[in-house]
Image (tube, rainbow, N blue to C red):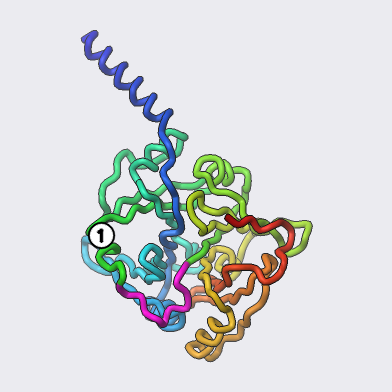
């Protein structure tokens, strides 16, 4: 009995030492953003026709569609989930980032006190991934693409010239407590501020937090209180990078003749074009570099 206790104590000590020395593996960019929709046909018209993305699907083990993957590039997807129940439901399901080692990242987050799954195994898509809650309860996923996954099998495929964008540069969502979110994204995960600004020079409405090992970013949407369905969709958004906003506008206008939005220069000095899917989620087309000096703070580049 005493020997068993000693072995248990030794095992606990070794585990504690391992947890203390856990290192964060690279987090290299956005992997996907999950969105709920009310009508798959209307979603296809927007994401498939207007934005020009092709997709593949994953079914539930019990039968029936689980989701459609609209492919931006081999490592980035817009995940469309059916079953939006009404205005009270947030359209943004979750945001996912790509890592080079999901298991090591799980161990690292566990060592920092973040609640993580007890163990990881390939999912239905055959990738290694796991979900956590950020300090405000937002679902954040980390994905490692694996050989033989449904994504890897389609690398180099489903990449038509009709795509408005070939890179999803950021996703944003409503944040109420910047300090609490910083404790997770900045202090634990290693994200860094690349720019912050507001509708006026005295207010911070947006904070761009770049992933530690890539160029994509997460955007805190601050100062949002009691949002309507439309304003929630404006804030909980995705952004697609484009080289030339005018060319993107011409392409979208030809596919959506009733479009009333026009390109404009944002407070970050970049050209942008705001589009909205049928359930009012904003899809922001944005040029990669500012053409004017950004307001409020310098834009930190690598």
**Residue named by callout 1:** 149
Membership of 160 in magenta stretch: yes
Secondary structure beneath label 1: loop
The quadrant of the rendering that contains the N terminus is top left
Membership of 182 in magenta stretch: no
Question: Which residue is at the far front?
Answer: 302
Q: Which residues are magenta?
A: 157-167
* Image x and y of residue 282, in percent: 54, 71
Asked if 227 appears above or below 291 in the picture, the reply is: above
The quadrant of the rendering that contains the C terminus is bottom right
Can see residue 42? no
Look at 43% across and 78% down and name the residue there.
163
Look at 39% across and 68% down and name the residue there.
73
Which corner quadrant of the image does residue 259 belong to? bottom right
Look at 51% across and 64% down and name the residue there.
169
Q: Is residue 70 left or right of residue 238?
A: left
* Image x and y of residue 41, in percent: 37, 80
Q: Residues within 10 Å of mark 1 (few under 14, many from 20)?
A: some
Asked if 48 appears above or below 183 in the picture, the reply is: below
Tell me which secondary structure the magenta stretch mostly adopts.
loop
Closest to the observer, 281 or 75: 75
Can see residue 204? yes
């Amino acid at each position: 009995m005493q020997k068993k206790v000693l072995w248990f104590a030794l095992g606990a000590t070794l585990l504690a030492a391992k947890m203390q020395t856990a290192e964060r593996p690279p987090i290299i960019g956005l992997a996907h953003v999950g969105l709920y929709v009310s009508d798959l046909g209307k979603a296809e018209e927007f994401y498939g026709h207007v934005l020009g993305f092709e997709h593949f699907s994953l079914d539930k083990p019990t039968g029936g569609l689980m989701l459609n993957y609209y492919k931006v590039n081999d490592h980035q997807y817009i995940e469309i989930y059916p079953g939006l129940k009404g205005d009270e439901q947030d359209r943004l399901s979750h945001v996912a980032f790509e890592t080079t080692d999901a298991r090591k990242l799980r161990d690292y987050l566990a060592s920092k006190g973040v609640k993580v799954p007890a163990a990881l195994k390939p999912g239905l898509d055959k990738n290694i991934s796991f979900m956590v809650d950020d300090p405000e309860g937002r679902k954040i996923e980390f994905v490692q693409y694996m050989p033989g996954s449904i994504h890897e099998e389609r690398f180099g495929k489903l990449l038509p010239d009709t795509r408005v964008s070939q890179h999803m540069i950021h996703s944003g969502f409503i944040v109420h407590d910047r300090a609490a979110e910083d404790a997770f994204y900045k202090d634990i995960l290693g994200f860094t501020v690349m720019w912050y600004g507001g509708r006026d020079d005295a207010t911070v409405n947006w904070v761009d937090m770049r992933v530690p090992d890539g160029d994509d970013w997460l955007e805190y949407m601050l100062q949002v209180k009691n949002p309507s369905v439309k304003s929630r969709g404006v804030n909980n958004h995705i952004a697609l990078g484009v080289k030339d906003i005018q060319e993107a506008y011409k392409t979208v206008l030809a596919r959506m003749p009733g479009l009333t939005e026009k390109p404009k220069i944002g407070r970050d000095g970049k050209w942008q074009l705001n589009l909205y899917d049928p359930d009012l989620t904003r899809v922001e087309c944005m040029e990669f570099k500012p053409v004017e000096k950004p307001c409020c703070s310098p834009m930190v580049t690598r």
